[in-house]
Amino acid sequence: MNVIDLFAGCGGLSLGFELAGFNIIQAVEFDEKIAASYSANHKGVNLIIDDIKNVDNKKIFKKGSAEVIIGGPPCQGFSMAGARIRDGFIDDPRNYLFKHYFNVVKEVMPKAFIIENVKGLLTMQRGEILRQIFTLFSNSNLLNGHRYFLHYKIVKAVEMGIPQKRERIIILGLLDKDFDLEKEWENTIKIVKQIKPHFFDRTTVKDAIGNLPAPTESGEVDNPTPKTEYQRELFSNSKTIYNHLKTKHSAKCIERIKKIHCGENFTVLDEKINSVHSGSYGRLSWDEPSQTITTRFDTPAGGRFIHPTANRTITPREAARLQSFPDSFVFIGNKSTIAKTIGNAVPPKIGYFLGELIHNILRRK
C-alpha cells in the first residue's frame, strides 16, 4: 500500500512504515536542513521540500494515490478558546498547517490516516482541541459525503521495547468504517510478537548503547558486535557506523559532570545552575530507560542526557539508538541540526507498529 508522509522530518515514521511493508511514495518537509537526512535515507521517495501551504495550493496530490497518510501537524492554533469558527477551523492563522493536512486528506481520500502529536493535545483546552479534530474529520459535508471514524491512544515508547520514557498521542482515522482500536491494538501486538518475538521486551540504556566504543572526532567508529536483542534489531552490516561524535564541553562543565552519579542531577552540585529544566545535568542510569530524547540532548543543562559512565552528554548515535533508529541511518548536518533532527523524530519502532496496526485493520475491513 502507498503512503504519503506529511511533516516528515528525517523520516522516522516513514522508516517504520517501510519496515512494515508499505511503499512511501511522497513526503513533505519544510526545513531543508532536516530534509537532507530524509533524502539521504529514503532515496526512492519523492521528497517535496516546501511549505505545506504551497504543496496544498499546487494540488500535487491526487485522489486515490495513497491508501494511508501519516504525519504530525501542529495544532497550536486550536487553543484560542471562544474564537470564531470558519469552515470547521478555529479562525487562527496558526491553524493553516493542520488545515492543509486536512485538505490533503480530503484530496487523496486515503483508507486511513494517522496524526501523531504531543500527549498534551489530550488535555489542551479541557479536550476541546481533540473534540474539534474529531468533529472536523467526521463532517461528511466537508468530505464530499464521506467521513472518517477516529480513535486515539497514548503510546508509551517503553511499551514498544524502546529504551525511552516518551509518550505521544496517536489519532487514527478510518474511511467510512468504524473500528475498535483497543481490540485491533491487542491483535496487532500478537501479530508483531509472532514476527519479532523480542519486539516488546523491556529495554534499558545499557541494552541500547552499552556496546558502543568511545566516540571520535569524526563521528565514525568501527561497527561493534551487538550483544543484546535490541542492538541486534538495530544492527547494520556495514563496517562503519556514523554520527558517534563526541560533544566538546568546557572544563567547568566537565568538573560539574564528574560530581554527578547515575540518577542524580544538578541538585547535588554546590552551586546555582541557571536552567529551566528540572533534570538539568542529569546522568542516565544503565539499568533504566532514558528520559524523552529532546533537541537539547547534547547540552548538560537540557535534561538528563549525561552518559552513565563517561563525563559527557550522549552522542547523536547514542540518542538515535535510544530513539530506535537503526545504525544504518545516517544523519546529515551540523551539530545543532542533527540534534534537532533526532530530538523531533518519531521513533521508527513506533512507526513499524502503527504500520502493522493499519495492515491489520484494513485487512479485516
Image: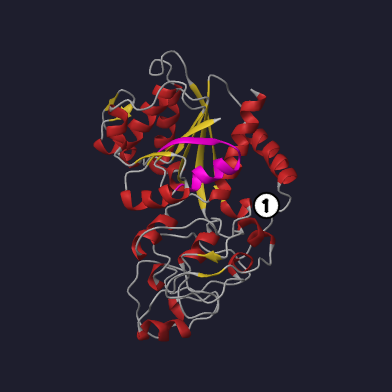
Q: Nearer the viewer, residue 309 or 30?
A: 30
- Image position of 259 with respect to 40: above or below: below
Q: Is residue 13 magenta?
A: yes
Q: Which residue is mark 1?
A: 200
Which structural element holds mark 1? loop
The coloring applied to the image is secondary structure
Structural crowding at the residue carrying mark 1, measured as other residues with C-alpha within 10 Å and reported as few (<14), some (14–19) or many (≥20): some
Q: Quadrant of the N terminus?
A: top right
Amino acid type, callout 1: Phe
Q: Is residue 318 visible?
A: yes
Q: Nearer the viewer, residue 172 or 33?
A: 33
Q: Is residue 96 magenta?
A: no
Q: Position of residue 223 (x, y in %)?
A: 58, 67
| Residue at position x 75%, y 44% in the image | 194
Q: Is residue 81 visible?
A: no
Q: Quadrant of the C terminus?
A: top right
Q: Position of residue 13 (x, y in %)?
A: 50, 44
- Image position of 152 with respect to 88: above or below: below
Residue placed furthest toward the front: 239
Which quadrant holds residue 289? bottom right
| Residue at position x 45%, y 77% in the image | 312
Q: Position of residue 340 (x, y in %)?
A: 38, 58
Q: Nearer the viewer, residue 305 or 64?
A: 64
| Residue at position x 44%, y 25% in the image | 137
Q: Position of residue 357 (x, y in %)?
A: 62, 36
- Image position of 281 with respect to 172: above or below: below
Q: Which residues are magenta?
A: 11-27
Q: Nearer the viewer, residue 20 or 306?
A: 20
User: Relative to residue 204, is residue 136 drawn left or right?
Assistant: left
